[in-house]
Image (cartoon, helix red, strand yellow):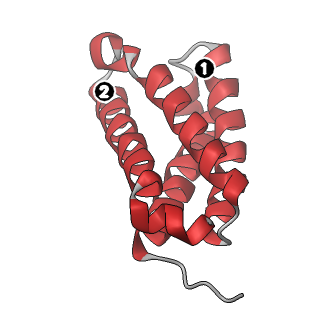
Amino acid sequence: MNIQRPPTVTVAAILLALLSAFGLITALIPAFSDKLPALVVYGSAVLGLVGLLAAYGLWTLKRWAVWIAIILSVLNILSAAPGLAFAPTSVLLVSAIVGIVGCALIIVLVVLPVSRRAYA
C-alpha cells in the first residue's frame, strides 16, 4: 500500500526536526547553556534527540511517531512556558516564544483529519 504523505505531515516533520535540532544546539553551545540550569540543558538535549527520532517517524508515516510528537510537543511547551516570564535575556525570551508556537503548530498539524488519514 503506497500512501502519499500529506503536506501537513511534511510541514510537521520538518518543523519538529528543526525545533529538535535547535534543542540539541542549545545544549551544546556554551553561550546558551551557561545561563541555564543543568537539568534544562540535559533535558533539552534528550528532547532534541527524541524529537529527531519522532520527526523521522512522521516523515515515514509511522503511527507511533504521532503520539511521540504530541507528547514531546506538550513537554516542550511546558518546559518553555516559564521562559515567557523569567527569561534572563531577550534571546531566550524569543526562543521560548518560537518554541511554544512551533510546538503548538506541530500538535495542530498532526491531529488534522488529513494527517490522521495518512496514518490509518
Left or right, 79 with reference to 69: left
Seen in the picture, residue 107 relative to 90 is either above or below; the reply is below
Dot label at residue 40: 1
Seen in the picture, residue 16 relative to 73 is either above or below; the reply is below
Contact (Cβ within 8 Å) of mark 1 with mark 2: no
Q: Amino acid at mark 2?
A: Leu
Residue that protrudes farthest toward the bottom in the picture: 2
Seen in the picture, residue 107 relative to 85 is either above or below; the reply is below
For the residue pair 82 and 12, the one nearer the viewer reads as: 12
The quadrant in which residue 8 appears is bottom left
For the residue pair 84 and 56, the one nearer the viewer reads as: 56
Residue 78, horizontal then vertical, whole percent: 47, 21
Residue 90, horizontal then vertical, whole percent: 27, 27
Q: Say which label, 1 or 2, has the lower sequence index.
A: 1
Q: Residue at x 50, y 18 (%)?
A: 35
Q: Residue at x 65, y 43 (%)?
A: 68
Give the quarter of the figure containing the C terminus. bottom right
Which element is circle 2 on?
A: helix
Left or right, 39 with reference to 23: right
Which element is circle 1 on?
A: helix
Count of marks placed on residues = 2
Q: Amino acid at mark 1?
A: Val
Left or right, 56 with reference to 110: right
Q: Residue at x 72, y 87 (%)?
A: 1
Dot label at residue 49: none
Left or right, 76 with reference to 11: right
Q: Residue at x 51, y 61 (%)?
A: 116
Question: Mark 2 sits on what residue?
Answer: 93
Crowdedness of circle 2 by 10 Å Cα count: few (<14), some, many (20+)?
Answer: some
